[in-house]
Image (tube, rainbow, N blue to C red):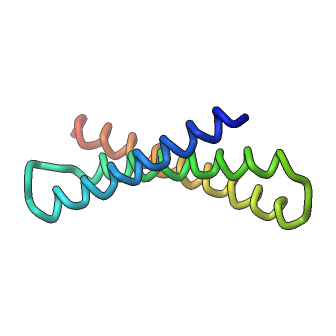
């Protein structure tokens, strides 16, 4: 369980750093950075943040932790929605 927490935390930090770097590159007009990549990182961050919340709530039982678990499920759903929208956007951009 502790290994999973470290992995979720590490992936979360890496995706946040990726988001900040991509935003910086876009606004500094360095390279042709697409917002699709930004939303991919954001979706990954949401998914792993939600999985981390769900993992933590499975270790403890109470009403407050149950609310956190619901937020974790919502984060995972939002992250998956971001990923699906980005994939559809990339496919549309490449095909048309």
Whole-percent x, y for residue 57 in the image = 79, 51
Residue 65 or 33: which is nearer the viewer?
65
Q: In this view, does 29 lie to the left or right of 1?
A: left
Q: Is residue 20 left or right of residue 81?
A: left
Image quadrant holding the N terminus, namely: top right
Q: Which of these two is toward me, 48 or 95?
A: 48
Q: Residue furthest right?
A: 62
Q: Which residue is drawn at 40% across and 45% down?
A: 14
* Residue at the extreme left of the image, as rendered: 30
> Number of numbered discs present?
0
The answer to whether 23 is drawn above or below residue 95 in the figure is below
Query: Residue placed at 91% from the left, 54% from the top?
Result: 61
Based on the displayed image, in which of its 4 quarters is residue 35 positioned? bottom left
- Residue shown at 30%/41% (left/top)? 90
Relative to 1, residue 26 above or below: below
Whether residue 90 sits left or right of residue 13 in the image: it is left
Residue 39 coordinates in the image, percent (x, y): 37, 52
Apparent side of residue 11 relative to residue 19 in the rendered image (left or right):
right
Residue at image point 69% right, 52% down: 53
Please state, as top left, top right, bottom left or bottom right, where the C terminus lies in the image: top left
């Amino acid at each position: 369980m502790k290994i999973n927490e470290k992995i979720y935390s590490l992936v979360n930090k890496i995706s946040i750093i990726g988001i900040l770097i991509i935003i910086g590159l876009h606004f500094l007009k360095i390279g042709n950075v697409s917002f699709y990549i930004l939303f991919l990182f954001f979706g990954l961050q949401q998914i792993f943040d939600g999985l981390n919340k769900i993992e933590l709530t499975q270790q403890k039982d109470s009403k407050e932790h149950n609310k956190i678990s619901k937020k974790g499920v919502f984060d995972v759903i939002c992250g998956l929605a971001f990923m699906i929208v980005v994939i559809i956007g990339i496919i549309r951009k490449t095909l048309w």
